[in-house]
Amino acid sequence: MLKKLGNFLRKKILLVIFIGFVLGIIATIYTHKVIETTSTDESCETCHVHPHVFNSWKLSVHYDNRVGMHVGCVDCHLPPKGHGYLKEKIKASSRDIYSYLVKDSADFNWEAKSSLEEAQHFVFKESCIKCHANLFPLTLNKDGQAAHLYYSQNEDDLRCINCHLNVGHYNPNAIHAKNVEFGNAGEKNQEKYTAAATITKFEDFTETIPGTTISFNMKAIPGGSFKIGSPANEPYRKPDEGPQKEVKLSPFFMAEVEITWDTYLAFYSATAAEGRTTDTEGSRTKNVVDAITGPTPPYGQPDQNWGLGSRPAITMSYHSAETFCKWLSKVTGKTYRLPTEAEWEYAARGGTETPFFFEGDPKDFGKKGFFGKLFGNDDNKIDNFIIYKANSNLKTAKPEAVDANPFGLKNMLGNAEEYCSDWYSENAYEKLRNGAVNPKGPATGKEHVIRGGSFKSEIGEVRSAARDFTKSVAWMKTDPQMPKSIWWLSDCNYISFRVVCEFNNNNNPKTKN
């Protein structure tokens, strides 16, 4: 009896196992079919409803090319199988379903999501390499060979999309040749200035650049003493902001806004004519173009297609900013230069000692949106003064977007970071003497100070005391030229500068002999 019962149970167990095995196979088959079905271009199109994506894809070299190869959505936006495919598939599907059900695609900043910063999160290097295993095909030209050699030597720091961001979605503004037409919009129908501004006393003035239609406002910054750096208890403070030291500054003039594209292009037009030939960077010398050699034509569109005009000029190198100051000094007869770090912070503070030149706790400003309303003060006062990550749509803004600080300066904090003349040192303030007059920072260094934060910055990076420095190598990784350009940055779209005009005891800007 027991034996029969045991045989019966054994058969039942085997039957259950068999049924489970069959159901498992069926589930696997259908799961595979679900994965395959939801990985088709048609399936992607049901969720990704932003207006340009499929049109730009069908215009790209990944859709229609000389070899007839068709690259689908998942070929780029999911890694190959064996490289975390299923995990990324689940993550992407969950994110897409949530966005489809909860969010409105009309509110998305598609331009920002098409940027390199965003694209690197959903385009996989392994996918590129799967199709392009040979980086040195016979059809590759000389420039391509140099670029791919550079990539192979820096694979840990570079992605394929650093240079090939637009191959999957066509962008008519992305070009790989020198943009010799940049800045050639033609002269405006305005009368050109015949002389620079004349200054008779220490007060705000408007500079007029001879031979151009360009003018810009300079603010008279009174001399005085202040504490450079931040106190130890300031929110988001970093070690290189201290110890605080009392320093004294003489009066100087500073530009009301960052150098605009209109102003920078006046310099470009006046000094870069030779650069519009096929001459290489190496063939240019410092003894041409009336002693001021200007930038060679850039690759692509340095303004990122955000617009020229009154927006801050960006993507120029430190060398380019310094050369601009030399040119401006020459054509106006005054001494223009980049501000020292002490001058910059003194001007940015506008006589205040708080984290910003207006009242408010950085931690409260940092609590934005839904969680800010629940757990903190969702204070939007900062939006009146600073363009930063939370309100910028990841692009620069025009000067009228913000109010000025107590010295009448706009966008000292946020919008675009600004070059200073000082070499950067993490412990610069430790070596600074209390009571120092017009300090200029370390005598030597590898990188220069940049200040102010940018449209990409978090709240802590746009405080008056926040410090940063140039990244000479990182900002030039994808420059196609060998040697790299000394004028334009290929990998930094958030740096600009503003100028200082020196003032002497005779109440006149210093002039060149």
Image (cartoon, rainbow, N blue to C red):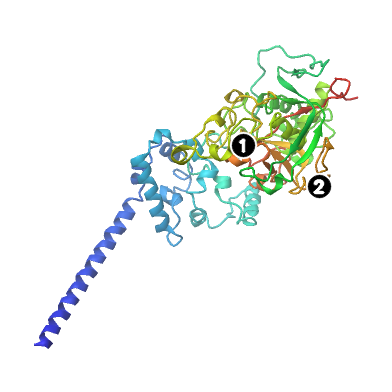
Frontmost residue, 419 versus 375: 375
Label 1 is placed on what type of residue?
Ser
Distance between the Cα atoms at labels 1 and 2?
28 Å
Measured from the top left, where is residue 191 in percent x and y? 71, 11
Frontmost residue, 421 versus 460: 460
**Left or right of 60, for residue 289:** right
Q: Regarding mark 2 in the picture, which secondary structure is present there?
A: loop
Res. 431 mark: 2
Label 2 is placed on what type of residue?
Lys
Q: How many other residues sit within 10 Å of disc 2, few (<14), some (14-19) or many (≥20)? A: few
> Which residue sits at x=40%, y=33%?
106
Disc 1 marks which residue?
Answer: 454
Measured from the top left, where is residue 24 in percent x and y? 26, 66
Q: Quadrant of residue 260?
A: top right
Q: How many other residues sit within 10 Å of disc 1, few (<14), some (14-19) or many (≥20)? A: many
Q: Earlier in the sequence, mark 1 or mark 2?
A: 2
> Which residue sits at x=81%, y=21%?
332
Q: Nearer the viewer, mark 1 or mark 2?
A: 2
Quick check: 310 above or below 92?
above
Q: Regarding mark 1 in the picture, which secondary structure is present there?
A: loop
Q: Quadrant of residue 319?
A: top right
| Residue 448 showing in the rendered view | yes
**Left or right of 475, for residue 207:** right
